[in-house]
Image (cartoon, helix red, strand yellow):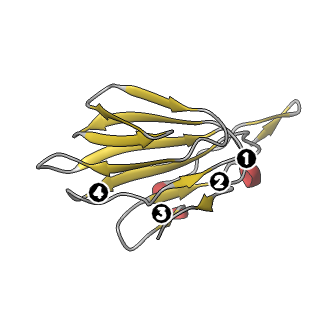
Amino acid sequence: IHQGGLMHTVIHAGELRRSRGGTITFEGEPHGSGVSLFLVDSEPGAGPGLHTHPYSETWVVRSGTARFTAGGEELEAGPVDIIVVGAGTPHKFVNAGPGRLDIVCIHASPVMIQENLEE
């Protein structure tokens, strides 16, 4: 919806890409947003390999426990914890709990740019 030069949009869940593992991907650029994000709901032990981005990434743990590796350090985060890594910092996370991990991964970029450092 365009009103007076402002754009307002609702993107319904069915319009977003979902991976085989259930992660929903949102890239902001087509919607006029300066951020992109993943909505992750993963099984214990699941998570991405070590990688970097040329921008910062911020995570909000909604439920479960995540174990992060960032810049060679390990840290753990639980519900409502917020984690931030700076641009170019090698990082990864894994669902460290017995239950599912519900986490929002916010990319400070209208498109996702990722360099994988391990498989």
Spatial separation of the CA atoms under disc 2 and disc 4 = 20 Å
Instruction: Say which of marks 2 and 3 sits in front.
Output: 2
The kind of secondary structure element at disc 4 is strand
Instruction: Say which of marks 1 and 3 sits in front.
Output: 1
Spatial separation of the CA atoms under disc 3 and disc 4 = 19 Å
**Residue 91 shown left or right of residue 99 in the figure:** right
- Choose between 57 and 26: the one closer to the eye: 57
Q: Residues within 10 Å of mark 1 (few under 14, many from 20)?
A: some
The kind of secondary structure element at disc 1 is loop
Check disc 4 and give the amino acid type.
Ser
Q: Disc number at residue 42?
A: 4
**Vertical arrangement, residue 105 with respect to residue 27, above or below:** above
Mark 4 and mark 2 in contact (Cβ < 8 Å)?
no
Q: Residue furthest front?
A: 72
Task: Look at mark 3 in the image and give the residue it sits on.
Answer: 14
**Vertical arrangement, residue 54 with respect to residue 6, above or below:** below
Say which quarter of the image contains residue 43. bottom left
Tally of numbered discs? 4
Q: Residues within 10 Å of mark 2 (few under 14, many from 20)?
A: many
Q: Mark 1 or mark 3, which has the lower sequence index?
A: 3
Q: Mark 1 or mark 2, which has the lower sequence index?
A: 2
Pinpoint residue 51: horizontal percent, then vertical percent. 55, 55
Check disc 3 and give the amino acid type.
Gly
Name the quadrant of the N terminus.
top right
Check disc 1 and give the amino acid type.
Pro
Task: Look at mark 1 in the image and give the residue it sits on.
Answer: 110
Q: Disc number at residue 27?
A: 2
Mark 2 and mark 1 in contact (Cβ < 8 Å)?
yes
